[in-house]
Amino acid sequence: MDAEARHLALSLSLLFVLFRLSFSDDASDAATLLKFKDSVADPSGSLDGWTQNSGPCREPKWAGIICNGDGEVYGLQLENMGLSGPLNLGPLTDLPSIRTLSFSNNRFTGPMPGVRDFKGLKNVYLSANNFTGGIRDDAFDGMRSLKKVVLSRNKFSGRIPSSLVLVNSLSELWVDYNGFDGQIPNFQQSDLQVVNVSNNNLEGSIPPRLSAMDPSMFAGGEAK
Ligand SMILES: *[C@@H]1O[C@H](CO)[C@@H](O)[C@H](O)[C@H]1NC(C)=O
Ligand SMILES: *[C@@H]1O[C@H](CO)[C@@H](O)[C@H](O)[C@H]1NC(C)=O
Protein backbone atom coordinates (compact mmCIF):
# COMPACT_ATOMS: atom_id res chain seq x y z
CA MET A 1 0.00 0.00 0.00
CA ASP A 2 1.22 3.49 -0.72
CA ALA A 3 1.01 6.20 1.91
CA GLU A 4 -2.27 7.60 0.69
CA ALA A 5 -4.06 4.25 0.62
CA ARG A 6 -2.75 3.48 4.06
CA HIS A 7 -4.01 6.81 5.29
CA LEU A 8 -7.44 6.17 3.83
CA ALA A 9 -7.61 2.69 5.35
CA LEU A 10 -6.65 4.12 8.73
CA SER A 11 -9.29 6.87 8.56
CA LEU A 12 -11.95 4.36 7.59
CA SER A 13 -11.13 2.00 10.40
CA LEU A 14 -11.07 4.88 12.87
CA LEU A 15 -14.50 5.96 11.68
CA PHE A 16 -15.70 2.41 12.08
CA VAL A 17 -14.35 2.17 15.62
CA LEU A 18 -15.97 5.49 16.58
CA PHE A 19 -19.29 4.37 15.17
CA ARG A 20 -19.05 1.06 17.00
CA LEU A 21 -18.17 2.82 20.25
CA SER A 22 -21.14 5.20 20.23
CA PHE A 23 -23.48 2.45 19.18
CA SER A 24 -22.23 0.00 21.76
CA ASP A 25 -22.59 2.64 24.52
CA ASP A 26 -26.31 2.66 23.95
CA ALA A 27 -26.44 -1.13 23.57
CA SER A 28 -24.56 -1.76 26.79
CA ASP A 29 -26.66 0.82 28.69
CA ALA A 30 -29.72 -0.99 27.33
CA ALA A 31 -28.45 -4.37 28.53
CA THR A 32 -27.73 -2.92 31.98
CA LEU A 33 -31.19 -1.34 32.27
CA LEU A 34 -32.93 -4.53 31.10
CA LYS A 35 -31.12 -6.44 33.82
CA PHE A 36 -32.40 -3.89 36.34
CA LYS A 37 -35.93 -4.10 34.90
CA ASP A 38 -35.90 -7.87 35.47
CA SER A 39 -35.11 -7.27 39.14
CA VAL A 40 -38.13 -5.05 39.98
CA ALA A 41 -41.80 -5.97 40.26
CA ASP A 42 -43.78 -3.91 37.74
CA PRO A 43 -47.42 -5.02 38.03
CA SER A 44 -48.78 -2.11 35.98
CA GLY A 45 -46.34 -2.61 33.11
CA SER A 46 -44.80 0.86 33.39
CA LEU A 47 -41.52 -0.41 31.94
CA ASP A 48 -43.02 -2.45 29.09
CA GLY A 49 -41.51 -0.04 26.55
CA TRP A 50 -38.00 -1.00 27.65
CA THR A 51 -37.24 -3.65 25.03
CA GLN A 52 -34.24 -5.31 23.45
CA ASN A 53 -34.74 -3.84 19.97
CA SER A 54 -34.79 -0.18 21.07
CA GLY A 55 -32.36 1.99 23.02
CA PRO A 56 -32.81 4.03 26.21
CA CYS A 57 -31.58 7.26 24.62
CA ARG A 58 -32.75 6.73 21.03
CA GLU A 59 -36.16 8.10 20.02
CA PRO A 60 -38.64 7.14 21.30
CA LYS A 61 -36.72 7.26 24.57
CA TRP A 62 -37.50 4.78 27.29
CA ALA A 63 -39.99 5.86 29.98
CA GLY A 64 -38.31 7.38 33.02
CA ILE A 65 -34.84 7.65 31.47
CA ILE A 66 -32.99 10.97 31.37
CA CYS A 67 -30.15 11.20 28.82
CA ASN A 68 -27.29 13.68 28.56
CA GLY A 69 -26.23 15.46 25.39
CA ASP A 70 -23.90 12.58 24.48
CA GLY A 71 -26.75 10.07 24.43
CA GLU A 72 -25.71 8.44 27.71
CA VAL A 73 -28.03 7.61 30.59
CA TYR A 74 -27.78 10.48 33.08
CA GLY A 75 -30.70 9.62 35.33
CA LEU A 76 -33.59 7.35 36.22
CA GLN A 77 -36.82 9.07 37.16
CA LEU A 78 -39.13 6.18 37.92
CA GLU A 79 -41.78 7.98 39.95
CA ASN A 80 -45.45 7.07 40.42
CA MET A 81 -45.10 3.86 38.45
CA GLY A 82 -46.55 1.35 40.91
CA LEU A 83 -43.20 -0.45 41.17
CA SER A 84 -42.80 -2.80 44.14
CA GLY A 85 -40.60 -5.37 45.82
CA PRO A 86 -37.07 -4.80 47.10
CA LEU A 87 -34.92 -2.33 45.16
CA ASN A 88 -31.49 -3.57 44.10
CA LEU A 89 -29.44 -0.88 42.39
CA GLY A 90 -26.42 -3.15 41.90
CA PRO A 91 -26.91 -3.63 38.14
CA LEU A 92 -27.06 0.15 37.57
CA THR A 93 -23.55 0.82 38.87
CA ASP A 94 -22.42 -0.22 35.35
CA LEU A 95 -23.89 3.04 33.98
CA PRO A 96 -20.88 5.40 34.11
CA SER A 97 -22.77 8.66 33.55
CA ILE A 98 -25.53 8.26 36.13
CA ARG A 99 -26.03 11.41 38.26
CA THR A 100 -29.60 11.22 39.51
CA LEU A 101 -31.84 8.41 40.77
CA SER A 102 -35.49 8.86 41.71
CA PHE A 103 -37.90 6.15 42.81
CA SER A 104 -40.35 8.35 44.75
CA ASN A 105 -44.01 7.42 45.12
CA ASN A 106 -43.89 3.71 44.42
CA ARG A 107 -44.45 0.68 46.65
CA PHE A 108 -40.90 -0.48 47.18
CA THR A 109 -40.24 -2.48 50.34
CA GLY A 110 -37.17 -3.89 52.09
CA PRO A 111 -33.98 -2.15 53.15
CA MET A 112 -32.38 1.06 51.87
CA PRO A 113 -30.72 0.22 48.53
CA GLY A 114 -26.94 0.73 48.41
CA VAL A 115 -25.94 3.99 46.72
CA ARG A 116 -22.33 4.60 47.64
CA ASP A 117 -20.93 2.71 44.63
CA PHE A 118 -22.36 5.45 42.38
CA LYS A 119 -19.35 7.70 42.67
CA GLY A 120 -20.74 10.59 40.62
CA LEU A 121 -24.26 10.55 42.07
CA LYS A 122 -25.75 13.99 42.84
CA ASN A 123 -29.36 13.28 43.78
CA VAL A 124 -31.19 10.34 45.29
CA TYR A 125 -34.95 10.37 45.89
CA LEU A 126 -36.58 7.42 47.67
CA SER A 127 -39.51 9.24 49.32
CA ALA A 128 -43.02 7.83 49.77
CA ASN A 129 -42.33 4.12 49.56
CA ASN A 130 -42.34 1.40 52.20
CA PHE A 131 -38.62 0.99 52.84
CA THR A 132 -37.94 -0.37 56.32
CA GLY A 133 -35.17 -0.93 58.84
CA GLY A 134 -31.88 0.67 59.75
CA ILE A 135 -29.45 2.26 57.30
CA ARG A 136 -25.78 1.29 57.60
CA ASP A 137 -23.73 4.01 59.19
CA ASP A 138 -21.28 3.93 56.26
CA ALA A 139 -24.02 4.02 53.60
CA PHE A 140 -22.74 7.32 52.13
CA ASP A 141 -19.01 6.82 52.66
CA GLY A 142 -16.77 8.41 50.05
CA MET A 143 -19.55 10.11 48.07
CA ARG A 144 -18.09 13.39 46.82
CA SER A 145 -20.78 14.77 44.53
CA LEU A 146 -23.94 14.05 46.50
CA LYS A 147 -26.13 17.13 46.95
CA LYS A 148 -29.66 15.97 47.65
CA VAL A 149 -30.83 12.95 49.68
CA VAL A 150 -34.60 12.53 50.05
CA LEU A 151 -35.79 9.61 52.22
CA SER A 152 -39.07 11.16 53.45
CA ARG A 153 -42.19 9.11 54.21
CA ASN A 154 -40.85 5.60 54.64
CA LYS A 155 -40.37 3.34 57.65
CA PHE A 156 -36.65 3.76 58.14
CA SER A 157 -35.49 3.35 61.74
CA GLY A 158 -32.33 3.47 63.86
CA ARG A 159 -29.77 6.25 63.61
CA ILE A 160 -29.43 8.80 60.83
CA PRO A 161 -26.22 7.48 59.18
CA SER A 162 -23.18 9.41 60.37
CA SER A 163 -21.43 9.05 56.99
CA LEU A 164 -23.68 11.91 55.79
CA VAL A 165 -21.67 14.26 57.99
CA LEU A 166 -18.61 13.66 55.79
CA VAL A 167 -20.37 14.40 52.49
CA ASN A 168 -19.05 17.93 51.93
CA SER A 169 -21.19 18.59 48.88
CA LEU A 170 -24.48 17.91 50.71
CA SER A 171 -27.05 20.68 50.41
CA GLU A 172 -30.40 19.01 51.22
CA LEU A 173 -31.29 16.09 53.47
CA TRP A 174 -34.94 15.09 53.91
CA VAL A 175 -35.74 12.24 56.32
CA ASP A 176 -39.12 13.54 57.60
CA TYR A 177 -41.84 11.02 58.48
CA ASN A 178 -39.73 7.98 59.35
CA GLY A 179 -38.87 6.21 62.59
CA PHE A 180 -35.29 7.45 63.09
CA ASP A 181 -34.15 7.71 66.71
CA GLY A 182 -31.10 8.87 68.68
CA GLN A 183 -29.39 12.21 68.10
CA ILE A 184 -29.14 14.35 65.00
CA PRO A 185 -25.55 13.87 63.70
CA ASN A 186 -23.33 16.92 64.05
CA PHE A 187 -23.69 18.35 60.56
CA GLN A 188 -21.25 21.16 59.82
CA GLN A 189 -21.15 21.39 56.04
CA SER A 190 -21.22 24.95 54.78
CA ASP A 191 -23.48 24.26 51.77
CA LEU A 192 -26.32 22.75 53.81
CA GLN A 193 -29.64 24.45 53.18
CA VAL A 194 -32.18 21.88 54.37
CA VAL A 195 -31.93 19.21 57.05
CA ASN A 196 -35.54 18.21 57.55
CA VAL A 197 -35.76 15.58 60.31
CA SER A 198 -39.32 16.35 61.42
CA ASN A 199 -41.69 13.60 62.54
CA ASN A 200 -39.17 11.03 63.76
CA ASN A 201 -38.24 9.91 67.29
CA LEU A 202 -35.08 11.99 67.60
CA GLU A 203 -33.81 13.43 70.87
CA GLY A 204 -30.98 15.57 72.20
CA SER A 205 -29.89 18.93 70.90
CA ILE A 206 -30.00 20.50 67.47
CA PRO A 207 -26.40 20.87 66.18
CA PRO A 208 -25.21 24.52 66.16
CA ARG A 209 -24.80 24.63 62.36
CA LEU A 210 -28.56 23.86 62.02
CA SER A 211 -29.92 26.01 64.85
CA ALA A 212 -30.83 28.95 62.61
CA MET A 213 -32.86 26.77 60.26
CA ASP A 214 -36.66 26.78 60.09
CA PRO A 215 -38.05 25.13 63.27
CA SER A 216 -40.58 23.10 61.21
CA MET A 217 -37.63 20.91 60.14
CA PHE A 218 -37.27 19.64 63.72
CA ALA A 219 -40.95 19.42 64.68
CA GLY A 220 -42.57 16.18 65.80
CA GLY A 221 -39.75 14.80 67.94
CA GLU A 222 -37.92 15.53 71.18
CA ALA A 223 -34.87 17.21 69.62
CA LYS A 224 -34.46 20.85 70.65
C1 LIG B 1 -47.09 0.57 52.95
O1 LIG B 1 -47.58 -0.54 53.68
C2 LIG B 1 -48.84 -0.30 54.30
C3 LIG B 1 -49.20 -1.50 55.16
O2 LIG B 1 -48.37 -2.57 54.99
C4 LIG B 1 -49.89 -0.02 53.24
O3 LIG B 1 -51.13 0.25 53.82
C5 LIG B 1 -49.45 1.20 52.42
O4 LIG B 1 -50.34 1.43 51.36
C6 LIG B 1 -48.05 0.98 51.85
N1 LIG B 1 -47.61 2.21 51.21
C7 LIG B 1 -47.00 2.22 50.03
C8 LIG B 1 -46.61 3.57 49.52
O5 LIG B 1 -46.78 1.22 49.40
C1 LIG C 1 -40.15 19.83 56.91
O1 LIG C 1 -40.99 18.71 56.69
C2 LIG C 1 -42.28 18.84 57.25
C3 LIG C 1 -42.98 17.49 57.10
O2 LIG C 1 -42.96 17.03 55.79
C4 LIG C 1 -42.99 19.98 56.57
O3 LIG C 1 -44.29 20.15 57.11
C5 LIG C 1 -42.18 21.26 56.74
O4 LIG C 1 -42.78 22.32 56.02
C6 LIG C 1 -40.76 21.06 56.26
N1 LIG C 1 -39.98 22.26 56.57
C7 LIG C 1 -39.23 22.89 55.68
C8 LIG C 1 -38.59 24.16 56.10
O5 LIG C 1 -39.07 22.48 54.53
Image (spheres, rainbow, N blue to C red):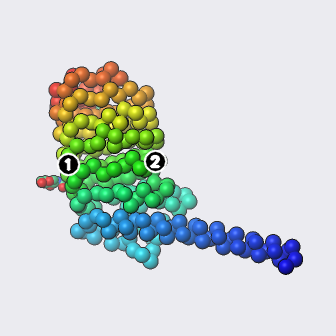
Q: Which mark is residue 195?
A: none
Q: Is residue 35 visible?
A: yes
| Nearer-N-terminus badge (2/1) | 2
Is residue 211 positioned above or below 109 on the image? Answer: above
Proximity of marks 2 and 1: CB atoms separated by less than 8 Å: no
Asked which quadrant contains residue 164, the reply is: top left
Quick check: is the Cβ at mark 2 less than 8 Å away from ligand 2? no
Task: State the residue position of label 1.
Answer: 132
Q: Amino acid at mark 1?
A: Thr
Q: Is residue 8 above or below residue 145?
A: below
Residue in the image at 81% along x and 74% along y: 6
Q: Position of residue 215 (x, y in %)?
A: 25, 26
> Callout 2, which amino acid?
Lys
Query: Is 69 above or below relative to 139?
Result: below
Q: Which residue carries the number 2 mark?
A: 119
Helix, strand or loop for disc 1? strand
In the picture, measured across the screen, residue 8 lies left or right of residue 49, that is right
Q: Position of residue 39 (x, y in %)?
A: 30, 65
Q: Tell me if mark 2 has few (under 14), some (14-19) or many (20+) residues whose alpha carbon lies within 10 angstroms of its own.
A: some
